[in-house]
Image: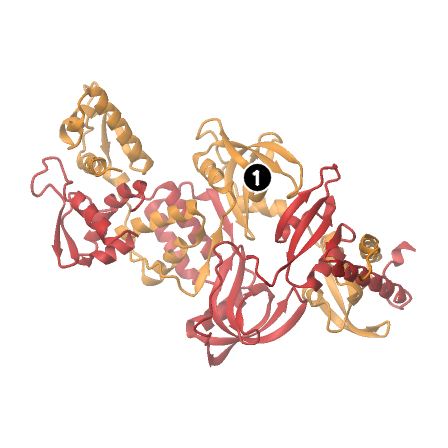
Amino acid sequence: MSGVADRLPRLLSLVPYLLARPGIPIAEAAADFDITPRQLRRDLELLWMCGLPGYGPGDLVDLSFSGDTVTVTEDAGMRRPLRLTTAEATALLVALRTLGEAPGVVDTAAVRRATAKIERAVGDAGVATVAVDLTREEEATAATVRGALDRGRALQIVYYTAGRDAVSRRTVDPMRLLLVEGRGYLEAWCRRAEGVRLFRLDRVEEVAELAEPSAPPSDAEPHDVSRGLFTPSEEHRTAVLEVAREARWIAEYYPVDEVVEHLDGSGSARVLLRYADPAWLVRLVLGLGGGARVLEPPELAVAVAERAREALAAATTTDDVPGGHGTGAGER
Amino acid sequence: MSSARAERLVNLVLCLLSTRQFLTAERIRATVPGYADATSDEAFFRMFERDKTELRELGVPLETGRTSAFDTVEGYRIARGDYELGEIDLDAEEAAAVALAGSLWDSPELSGAAHGALRKLRAAGVEVDETRGSVQPRVRAAEPAFAPLLAAVQAGQAVTFDHRRGGPTGEIARRTVEPWGVVSWRGRWYLVGHDRDREDVRSFRLSRILEPVKTVGEPGEVTVPPGTDLMASIHRSVDQGPVVGVATVWVAEGHAHGLRRLGTVVGPRELGGRQGDVLEIELRSERTVARWLAGAGPDVVVLDPPGLAAHVRRLWEGALAAHAGERVR
């Protein structure tokens, strides 16, 4: 059952669609309109009753069926589809302009040609109301990844993992090039991790196409990114932080499960933050300088204190190093 | 939509497309099959009004006017040139680009509209294959405020909403805004418009706009100033500012890779008996750089400027004070 509101626009599009494709299989036409062949037949039966005043033979829409195919023999003047609505033109043209600004990811020359042709056909009223800026900093990386996908080759990458704050070299079998939430990602089977991984393009430090074919295992499952990139998984743990007003931005920036606001007027809150790597959380809390306090897990609170103590000690012992100000030199 | 109504509407469109004269409602009632079912004048006019509204909502350019000065009532017609989609001829690469564009949106409002557009392009004879390839760009708009704001922008209607300043626990203020457009920048959606309360151009992150978003005044009241550049407004509001200096820091060998990526390595240096490298990092915001540096703990030593070194030291002292009571249990 298709939506009620969809039926009239579809009826107005069907005759020109079929005119352009004489003898098209009904199943194929139905698939293009995202309806069942049965619904398409009902639509065609209805159109058969429509036509021009006079409503005699020759005035009505006429169709000829042959096997499972259909051909329009009388169009009753419905030769072209209705022009695009402002909303339709906006959605399509803004998408095209967005892709036109994503070199490396797509063939931007073809995108620009298509944009110009569609603008000519539909006009561009209202299109200026939506704008999208895709990432365009990793053009060269994206282009190499796209080339490897096109040719079905494996890649060797040098990748920075923010969680572990480390760089590693890996051989991967590319599966998809994704642009999600304003960032580019290579989705690939990582031979070292033996799993499907998403690699942020801006953290790929080096990339080279290999001569060997890309061969992800047949059971390698692509990520479902339809609900966003950060879906909690078993490798994520949860920390409980007491966050002061000046550090509360972290609850918007990083994936959190819950924010419990303290109603004492201090602006502080208790935040349940997801993390995969303990070292990442320690770095975050150290950088917040007391703006956040780890309540759970306790061993991470200890780790923060340890790292801060060591950092202060290291800064103090290097205070007298010639040729450089030691940490804290400005305060003494 | 019932089949009878759909059939009547298709016939109405065909009838009005085929006439150069304006047809009065009475003529239409007598001509187009389906209206004869109306048992009274009142029933007919109600039916006809609903049909006109339906067609206008679909974007059918229904014209009203009089064919001659002697006509006493207005009639209707559809100019074919305004109704029909212009000629479009795309080669295979261009059609592939259009298919990719059609699948860019990950929001019901925009993807629905994009699919409607693709359907019409197909009806115009363009072959658009939507099979997903290995390159998949997607722009998501999951914020609840997105749909009402997009609708208000497209209707040219002012809106009022509660806005949370500075994130999840910020204070809430009521804003009335003339919406000029919605912008996605680095994966985040913003509303750009004229803030009536502050009499200035402002941008609002959609995730900080609370429901409900209510419209104020009539559609068409908001006019976007000519030459408005939405993206430039966002860039101004999130601009990190100019480079105000350079930080020189030492990082331990094999550590602090994140910092190494942010700066440039000047050369190796031994410090306090440890091997490492000296880095230079551009300073825009001292606060931000201080936070990154402090995160590296003992793997970093700030060499210059002294103010930054003091700032980082204060962060460590703060972190230590907040966690000093902790002992391994």
Q: Secondary structure at mark 1?
A: strand
Q: Is residue B244 visible?
A: no
> Which residue occupies 52% across, 48% down?
B184
Instruction: Identify whether B316 is placed above or below B58.
Output: below
Total labels drawn: 1
Q: State left or right for residue A141 relative to residue B280.
A: left
| Quadrant placement of the N terminus of chain B | top left
Q: Is residue A145 visible?
A: yes
Point out residue A224 in the picture as x, y percentages from the top left corner.
Answer: 48, 60
Q: Which residue is mark 1?
A: B209
Q: Find the residue positioned furthest to the left.
A: A57
Of A187 and A52, which appears nearest the observer? A187
Q: State left or right for residue A139 relative to residue B33.
A: right
> Which residue occupies 44% across, 49% down?
A94
Give the orange chain's letter. Answer: B
Name chain A's colour: red
Residue B176 lies in what quarter of the image?
A: top right
> Which residue occupies 27% across, 33% down?
B62
